[in-house]
Image (spheres, helix red, strand yellow):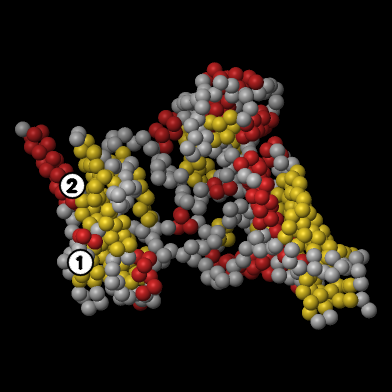
Amino acid sequence: MKKITLFIVLLMSFQTYSQEIKSYTWDEKPTFKEIPEEYKNQPAVVLLDKRWIHTRVGGYSYATFGMNHFAIKINKAEEINKYNKIKAQDNGYIRDVRDFHARVIKPNGEIKILPQDKIIETTEDKVKSIVFEGVEAGDILEYYFIIKENPMSYGVEVFQKEIPVLFAEFTHTQEGVKFETFASSEFEQSALNNKSISTATNIPPYKEEPNALNLKNLVKLIYMVSTPGMDIYNWNYFLPQYLSKPSFQYFKKTQAREFIEKLNIGTESTEEKLIKIDEYIKTNFDFVGKGETAQKITNLNNGKQKLTGGDIFDLYGFTLKELKIPYKVVVGMSRFNGEVNTEKFVVPLSHEFMYYIPETKKFLSPYDKYLCYGYPSYELQGSVGRTYYPALKENYQLTFPIAPAEFTVNESQSTVSLSDDFAVATIEKLYSNTGYDGQLYRNWVTYIKGNEEEKDLVDFIKKRIFGDEFDIKISEYIFENQDFKYNYSNTPYIVKVKAEAKESLTENAGNLVLVNLGKLVGKQFNLYQETDRKWDVDLSYAKTYKHKIIFNIPNGYEVESFKDLEIDKKMSGDETMNCSFKSTARVEGNQLIVEVFEIYNSINYPKEVYQEYRNVVNASSDFTKASVVLRQKK
């Protein structure tokens, strides 16, 4: 009798939770938080952003109900069209819109409810939408909708916007499932009547900044839905299960063993074996593209073939195991998106799986087509990941190494001559890259050559070597060291170009001639407008730039001045971590030799030293405007 009573109570509570979200409504006369003085000049302010998800799974119940309640005050008329169009949708798998209401609250308190006949439903995807009409500056737009859809096992709720949010709330209730949330530090957690509630107040406008961990810094909440009693995403369970055995889909183990035999790996060192394995797979296998269907493989050693990412990853692992090369599986995450959770695999976040070789302290990256055995993906540098050691069935933490600035070097040498009338500049330029840039460029050019027209390749060279603001005509180009194998020795990837400037580099200034030689290093990033900084500066990778310009001084002319070409900017503090820009110039015979050395030794520069960092970056941009001054010989 007690069991029956308990069952009835639970059933009634389930029905109560489901009915409560379906019966949600707004206050007849709402009250919102007062807008702080600091936000009164904002074009618009979100007064309320309230979301509620109820997931019901079990028996004949299989649905998610979602409620979104939103209110925004429009302060400037030009912002109206940005916020007056609303779609009742969440994750794109909507089955039913249960309720949809919208209203306008005037500054004098008058409330205008939008009639239901203003709600429009699209024929194709059945999404309902509404447009607020007659909105004026000072109005508050408020709406809420309730939808029923197929349950999602995870989701990401972003609350921060380009305008302030005064009050944000995320509520979740559930029947028959486990519901976990991972929220930004701005949220406070509470519970009320078996509801789990997360709230945040006064969320500042999101500021998009170059070289910042933009996605990671967003105020957001991530949730995961799973079956109670089965914590399948805990690292202690997930990694052993995920890596228990290879699950080849398009070839068999016997074919994988034949593949290893035909690689002819014998008495080489571990380093040589790993290079041979990685080079063959990266050179001969590509990923099945979107919309393509993978084909069964009859011979893995039969040249260029396409496989799924999972099969390529498992082929690496199987090969290492067969050759008895100890390895660990490593899970990382782009430091620009977030951090690997210490306890479990958080499904909505994009993780990267790779292999770590303890003997050589290097990484194999199956999912990064451009990247050779060596350093991990540049997005992972300095972040913390999880490792699983199959031999001991144990998992640990690992901090990904940071490649030094000497690893990635961009180097150029330009020889410039002017026509007799100074109208045309002939340029011969050698441009080379090592490290991450070298590997990326090798991969991009290989792709362009195989999939696009020569015009696209020429445009790529122009933009990469000269910048998109330099109008030139390329007459000849040659690539050197293009094969993937050169990545392992970090051999420079070289492009040699002959070109003519369609626009002159020269400018007359009375009896003097100015030649804009700084432009030859290519377009440079600048921070002229970004005077203040909210976030630390996070670069993709440490790197070095070396440029040399050889200018053939025209007959009958001599150098009057090259002082604008000499710049020296350097951050203070630890030289092994700072950045600097230095350019020098000197005359040798009938040539002006200009040399530039620019280095960024760290991938992170705290906002406290931003002004020093900014000075160095702007120095490189200033250099592109610098000219040598010529005068006629007497």
Residue extending furthest left? 1
Residue 220, x across and y down, in percent: 38, 55
Residue drawn where x is 36% and y is 35% of the image: 232
Residue that mark 2 sits on: 18
Image quarter where the C terminus lies is bottom right
Rendered image: mark on residue 31: none
Asked whether residue 275 appears in the rendered view, the answer is: yes
Viewer-closest of 48 and 576:
48
Position of residue 160 in the picture relative to residue 290 (left or right): left
Disc 1, SS: strand
Q: Quadrant of residue 242?
A: top left
Residue 608, x across and y down, in percent: 55, 67
Asked whether residue 310 appears in the rendered view, the answer is: no
Viewer-closest of 352 and 137:
137
Residue extending furthest right? 634
Q: Quadrant of residue 463?
A: bottom right
Disc 2, SS: helix
